[in-house]
Amino acid sequence: EIHIKEPIEKEVNPRLLPGELLLCEASTVYKYIQEDGSNRGTYGKLVCTNFKIAFLDDDSASDDNEPQFKNKIVGENDITLQCVDQIYGVYDEKKKLLTGQLRKYPEKLIIYCKDLRVFHFCLRYTKEEEVKRIVSGIVHHSQTPKLLKRLFLFSYASAAPNNTGKYGRNQTVMFDTLEDWRDELERTKGNVKYKAVTTNEGYRVSEKLPLYFVVPICVSDESILKYEGRGIPIWCWSCHNGAALLKMSAFPKEQDDSASQMQKAFLDGIYKTISKPPYELLKMEDLSSSLPSLQDIQTAYTRFKQLFLIDNSTDFWATDVKWFSLLESTNWLEIIRRVLKKAIEVAECLERQHTNVLLIEESATDLCCVISTLVQVMMDSYSRTKSGFQSLIQKEWVIGGHGFLDRCNHLHKSDKEEAPVFLLLLNCVWQLVQQYPPAFEFTETYLTVLSDSLYVPIFSTFFFNSQHQKDTNMSGENLQTQSGPFRFLTVWDWSVQFDPKAQAFLNNTLYVEKPKPDKSQRKTTRFKHQRQLSLPLTQTKPSTKRGFFREETDHLIKNILGKRIGKFINSSDELPNSFREFYDSWHSKPVDYHGLLLPRIDGPEIKVWAQRYLRWIPEAQLHGGGTIATAAKILDLIEEVQSLQVKMDEEHSQAV
Amino acid sequence: MASSSTPKYNSNSLESPSSKRTLKDGTNWEHNEEIPRLPGETRVTDKDVIYMCPFNGPVKGRVYITNYRLYLRSVENDPVVVLNVPLGVISRIEKMGGASSRGENSYGLDITCKDMRNLRFALKQEGHSRRDIFEVLTKHAFPQSHNLPFFAFANEEKFSENGWMVYNPMAEYRRQGLPNERWRVTFINEHYGLCDTYPSLLVVPYNATDEDLKKVAAFRSRNRIPVLSWIHPETQAVIMRCSQPLVGMSGKRNKDDERYLDIIREANGQISKLTIYDARPNVNAVANKATGGGYEGEDAYPNAELFFLDIHNIHVMRESLKKLKDIVYPNVEESHWLSSLESTHWLEHIKLVLTGAIQVADKVSSGRSSVVVHCSDGWDRTAQLTSLAMLMLDSYYRTIEGFEVLVQKEWISFGHKFASRIGHGDKNHADADRSPIFLQFIDCVWQMSKQFPTAFEFNEQFLITILDHLYSCRFGTFLYNSEFLREKEKVTEKTLSLWSLINSEKSKYTNPFYTKELNRALYPVASMRHLELWVNYYIRWNPRIRQQQPNPVEQRYMELLALRDDYIRRLEELQITNNSKISNSSSSSTSPSQMMSHVQTHF
């Protein structure tokens, strides 16, 4: 039985962003607060715009208890069109997936969101005409294929040209200029052996590659151009010992024998060049064979997220007893574990074996991004600061050419391309954050809101497949109203979504900054000093392999290299022992939060990111508890210390 | 502890004793100045052995045995490998390999411990070296089986606090506002004549006479009649505990018992039914009728509502823990961790206990109804349920001292059979009476403290220390099965209390995030989504899994607290200086911003 107040006839209007248009609406929609059988809820208006689906509570007085942490763009009852995962209609107590044209309109609408929220709307009291309009409107705008230019991003950018581009560049390195790459080379001391190239200006090489990128100095422009950048080792990062992390887009399987012969010869040439001194030994890591496929990842995540999209209390408790085996059967945590393990293996090669690691993948824009990002987060403490992490995402993902548009399926073009690769990364980084909280300048809340931002189409960051795609769509020529190029917002400007009070929850108050080097020291020695500080676990004795190659003659090196390359060194046959040893020896020492950081990957250590996945489930709420309780205590204490500081300064000035 | 770590990593281990007195009779004790010894601890023997460390491989060392502990120090390793094991944790000692056994290190001793680990020592096959050490260990690890006293009776430690003073039943009942016009204190059990497993002081309904109590006792298993554990300060609803009624196959009834429960129901002026929680699964309760027990039937108790809480018996819990040990020691099950964990059912049992306690607490608090809790005898599952419900309802029990009172009251004084469940000093390792019921309770408390990190005054170390001394026999706290026996053995006179150790060094056990909140009911989420395996306890011997100690977040918070206190002090000084108009600008005061950078705090 439903006990509810009579709906109040009152005009409630949605708050619209610049460029946001109201497309359809329905009133007297009943939103269940929770499907717990009690049927408690509120009446309101359900609207659909070109940006979001929103429920507007008739009883606006309920705005009294404003949450402490609030998103300015997307409210609690707002669902951006890109955030909609699946829509179900309920007909005579039966759930049916709604996708395209509808013949019959449901009594109830269930919307499952990509950020794991679940909305239940009852349409029984709504006028039939309005039901038709709102249901088909919502389904059409959120579930059917869309043109890129119809993304809200463009309407917003053209309607609000003034509030863009204000974000200070100095905070996050965007990697869209040659300068940014040169600075990064200098920062990591990679500039001795690697160079930033302009070969791709005007996208002459490839539309998939960024405008600027970095390759070994010995690689010529001709080779880069030859196969549209395929088969070229592209630099990601240099380790303190000079060993570098590289990535390469592999050749697709050729039917034509002579073509594949030529490719092989080309590759051999490349390998030879970059395996000679001054370059380190090269270890190849074919990610498509050693890690789960994108399809596996998509399947696992689809199963996993389903565990958190819970309809009602009964479902929640019914699945509780078998929770661990359900979790295991999704394979998601196991994938996280395997990815972290691979990242440790790569770190071991760079750090201890002192070899270059070349990550190979067909496009070099999916698992390559995951592994290279994780390796840098683990090895480079700069990547554990907020701006460092953001710069890293720019470098490896946004400019690096991860196909966000296709992988998130923002345009509903092809389900086959969909795979939560970036979410996989965030899940892996979260494991590190919760294992070593003092090592990160940002919190798990930061990662959670970052994951939410994947579906907020006012930022360009996650809504293009490549830099080329963004550049070519910036001009705005298709829109008559627009004259100049669009200026998009970047997600890294957190003030767009959060006011300062809420932003405080993104910063880890317990983060201890890296000790600043003594200013009195000269520049060169200072740098060295800093390096040593940051990596105390660097092995002092060089590995035997390394010594061997250094001392022997060129002739011998060539002989051996030939064999080594032909073999395509596979990590699996020699790594386990040295991996275990590396892993164990690191874990037997105290943690240096500014040094190398290795995740713990034993069974009990890989956990579910509770904040992201459980936050909307009423049964799983810890009222007044959870990690947020300690976080709030820490924030309070810091505020107190700060005010004491102010008072002391006042007293000091009085004293003088 | 079994690891190659240096002492600073040993914070997960048993208390390192403060006493480092030199031994006067240290003839064979090499480097005796470094071998810890408690006052009253005496050496027995020592021997060269190879410690078969499951994590670091064989370790050559010398083992020292006293009347309290087994101590091993490696002779070649750097850093030195140290094992410091109270003999009380030993559950079983086995000889491995025989005279004919071949292969290196296959001849020696295998020691099974009660705290989730095994110790293996290889010995030389010469003389009677193994027989000697086996006999010495057996004798001192199982003193009760050899007519020897527990070490607790020899312990001569001194502490600044006296833990025996922590619990005074009268004071605790007074804190709860008892006795009042509806509840009275009775001394009927002063000499344990009514019930030899109950405390001497009991709180019962004012309207029930001592004669009534005697009649009720005849109908309750082991005379454990319903008595008050806790009263809600506002609703006046109470938590009562007891054992099962002796219904039997024939469905016996007892008018006195029926009337007594009705008096309880009426005591808080409640009109609705009295709620009885039977902790057992329904089928078990029925099966108990065959042995004379049973449950309150609807016909006999029309004013009571009975719920079964489906918590399994001591044997099921023992097997569950055994399975858990199999998947975490020595190696953590790798390939299918989650399903392996599920198959132990350990967390499922934790979930059921917590769910039951939540129901009890909610009934008393929101339902405003008095409840009676029992299982079969009312000393295992009943103790878990009442103490956890009290922890949820009464914030006093969430302080260090309050928790000590809670353990002392609901567990120790109400006759949880610690001696039988733990098997203190008893060689019979396969005794069916042994069961990790108290461990399970502490695990539930840990789960709650994990979910509500600011609600408890004590930290994880406090809980681990309690568990360590549950086995160690260094204190009298957990010895014997009942107050009656403890009085007979003069435990409070002849031994020390664990709370003396803890209360003398409270800061070590204090949770810096604790926020005092009065009268706030705290309900944990008893869902597998939030329950976790207590890695820092169950897998603490594995150096690969061990978590950072002390907790870095806690440590940083403490630094901030110290900074704040320092600022307050300095500010006061400054104000005094300023007020007295002595503006000595060249004073040595450091500017606060300088200090900030010193602590490297990022604001």
Image (tube, coloured by chain):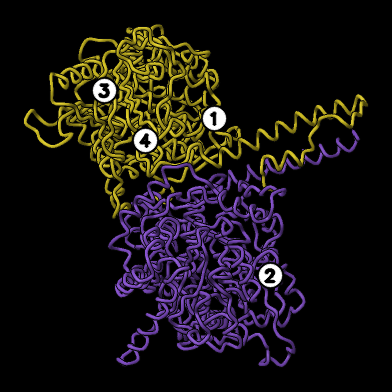
Chain colours: A purple, B yellow
Q: Which residue, given by chain and number where applicable, does mark 4 sit on?
A: B4
Between discs 4 and 1, the one toward the N terminus:
4
Q: Is the residue under label 1 in contact with that under label 3 (CB below 8 Å)?
A: no
Between discs 4 and 3, the one toward the N terminus:
4
Labelled disc at residue B423: 3
In front: label 1 or label 2 = 1
Q: Which residue, given by chain and number where applicable, does mark 1 sit on?
A: B510
In front: label 4 or label 3 = 4
Looking at the rendered structure, the kind of residue marked 3 is Gly
Q: CA distance from mark 4 to mark 3?
A: 30 Å
SS under mark 2: loop
Residue A396 drawn at (x, y percent): 53, 70
Residue B193 drawn at (x, y percent): 32, 9
Number of other residues with Cα within 10 Å of mark 1, as a class: few under 14, some 14 to 19, many 20 or more? some
In front: label 4 or label 1 = 4
Quadrant holding the C terminus of chain A: top right
SS under mark 3: helix
Chain under label 1?
B
Q: Is the residue under label 4 in contact with that under label 2 (CB below 8 Å)?
A: no
In front: label 3 or label 1 = 1
